[in-house]
Amino acid sequence: MARLEGCVRGADVLVVQGGINDIAQGFPVEVAAETLRAMVRRGQELGLGVVVADVLPWNNGWPTAESNIRRLNELIVAMAQEEGVEVLPFHDTLEDPDRPGRMREEWTSDGDHPSVSGYRRLGEVAFRLPEQC
């Protein structure tokens, strides 16, 4: 949130992604969700097209962080509906159906972040810009 103003300078679209770092640092998911809401609202105030991406599966945090990720994603969906923005389904796009809560090995480079194949999949399956752009 602190860097938002500088990051959106010259942008048409703001993509707000769910707070895995908040989960990793032990912040309550409700606080993370409200921070995401504040970013969405600020983007709208600035006249940007705004979308929000949910939290990715986190292989290195599984199973400890699993319930917090799912809860934060529920809060993100509810917030997005209330704020009138679309949710990009990053979690479900990269979740391994054979290993719920984790990315497929070929879709992660290190168990924390998507690999090139994972980012490609997000771009092909999950990423959609707001219609006003």
Image (cartoon, rainbow, N blue to C red):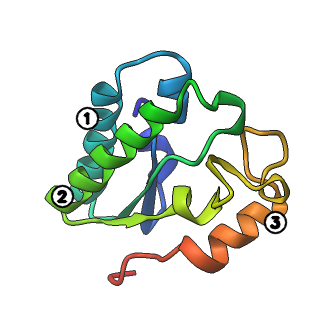
- Whether residue 25 is visible here, answered yes or no, is yes
| Label disc, if present, on residue 117 of the rendered structure | 3
Q: Amino acid at mark 2?
A: Glu
Return the disc, 1 or 3, that comes first in the chain's sequence: 1
Q: Amino acid at mark 1?
A: Glu
| Label disc, if present, on residue 83 of the rendered structure | 2
Q: Secondary structure at mark 3?
A: helix
- Considering every residue shown, the one lying at the far top of the view is 26
Q: Is 65 placed left or right of 96 in the picture?
A: left
Q: Is 30 placed left or right of 102 in the picture?
A: left
Q: Secondary structure at mark 2?
A: helix
Query: Residue placed at 38% from the left, 76% from the top?
Result: 130
Name the quarter where the N terminus is drawn. top left
**Front tag of 1 and 3:** 3
Query: Residue placed at 49% from the left, 26% from the top?
Result: 23
Q: Measured along the vertical axis of the image, is residue 23 above or below residue 113?
A: above
Q: Position of residue 14 (x, y in %)?
A: 43, 59
Q: CA distance from mark 1 to mark 3?
A: 31 Å
Q: Position of residue 52 (x, y in %)?
A: 40, 57
Label 3: how many Cα within 10 Å (few below 14, some 14–19, many 20+): few
Q: Amino acid at mark 3?
A: Ser
Task: Check disc 1 and report the residue beneath it.
Answer: 34
Q: CA distance from mark 2 to mark 1?
A: 12 Å
Label 1: how many Cα within 10 Å (few below 14, some 14–19, many 20+): some
Q: CA distance from mark 3 to mark 2?
A: 31 Å
